[in-house]
Image (cartoon, helix red, strand yellow):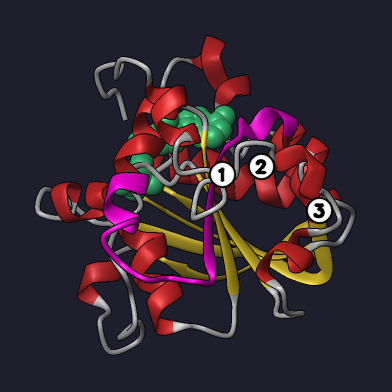
Amino acid sequence: MRLRKVKNARERLAQNNNTYYIEDAKIYKGKWQSLFKNENPLYIEIGCGKGQFIMELAKRNPNINYVALEKFDSVLLRALEKAILDDIPNLKLAVIDAESITEYFDKGEVSKIYLNFSDPWPKKCHAKRRLTFKTFLDQYRIILKEDGNIEQKTDNRHFFEFSLESFNDNGWKLHDICLDLHNETEKYPDNITTEFEDKWSKLGPIYRLVAEKK
Ligand code: SAM
């Protein structure tokens, strides 16, 4: 999501520190449950964009704790502006780059990771930036619980194929592979769309997979 840089985005986020936005997220490594004041499972979305998906998901599942991660503060500010109009006690937002995710979440602390419409980085020379590249999968493996999993959706066939291969080559077990999510509504009646999904599903199929640690 290439949003225009918002002036003073970090300061504006900080003004809302500890409502939804968590400025010093590293200090919660291994302690996210204490922040939510319960022992519910922790689910995270990497690259939440403006947050439509995770806000709706959190509202539907009050017994799960959610953290929405976003690399860019200007983008997260948009999500925060939406969240503060609502009351979602089981949701937190943080500026976190997936590259350093193990600095924020402890071994086995996370039950599920959502990767929704991650940037496909189509050029081969940029493959290492794809959020399903081996180096990212190795970090996800550390923070996920033994029975934890990753749910990925994308509109980009090439990126989807790359991800299938990457999960497979790196010892993940794939299931629930779907090649046209919006035409399988009986199978996925609870699908919650993201901003990108609303836009791109009009133009072609949406791909989905679930990958489990083996
Ligand atoms: N998930 C949203 C959706 O489906 O509408 C946004 C999709 S957008 C194409 C990808 C998002 O991932 C952008 O907001 C981008 O800033 C974020 N992102 C890209 N690389 C990231 C990284 N390394 N760590 C965290 N977020 C990242």
The answer to whether marks 1 and 2 mark residues whose Cβ atoms lie closer than 8 Å is yes
In the image, 72 versus 22, the foreground residue is: 22
3D distance between C-alphas at marks 2 and 3 = 18 Å
**Badge 2: how crowded within 10 Å, few (<14), some, or many (20+)?**
some
**Badge 1: how crowded within 10 Å, few (<14), some, or many (20+)?**
many
In the image, 45 versus 125, the foreground residue is: 45
3D distance between C-alphas at marks 1 and 2 = 5 Å
Looking at the figure, which quarter contains the C terminus?
Answer: bottom right
| Vertical arrangement, residue 8 with respect to residue 187, above or below | above
Q: Is residue 91 magenta?
A: yes
Q: Is residue 130 left or right of residue 123?
A: right
- The residue furthest bottom is 186
The residue type indicated by label 3 comes to Ile
| Vertical arrangement, residue 68 with respect to residue 128, above or below | below
Q: Residue at x 83, y 58 (%)?
A: 31
Q: Residue at x 73, y 79 (%)?
A: 38
Q: Residue at x 47, y 41 (%)?
A: 47
In the image, 74 versus 161, the foreground residue is: 74
| Mark 1, residue position | 163
Label 2 element class: helix
- The residue furthest top is 125
Q: Is residue 66 left or right of residue 141?
A: left
Q: Is residue 57 left or right of residue 105?
A: left
3D distance between C-alphas at marks 3 and 1 = 19 Å
**Badge 3: how crowded within 10 Å, few (<14), some, or many (20+)?**
many
Residues drawn in magenta? 80-100
| Mark 2, residue position | 166
Q: Is residue 165 visible?
A: yes
The residue type indicated by label 2 comes to Ser
| Mark 3, residue position | 143
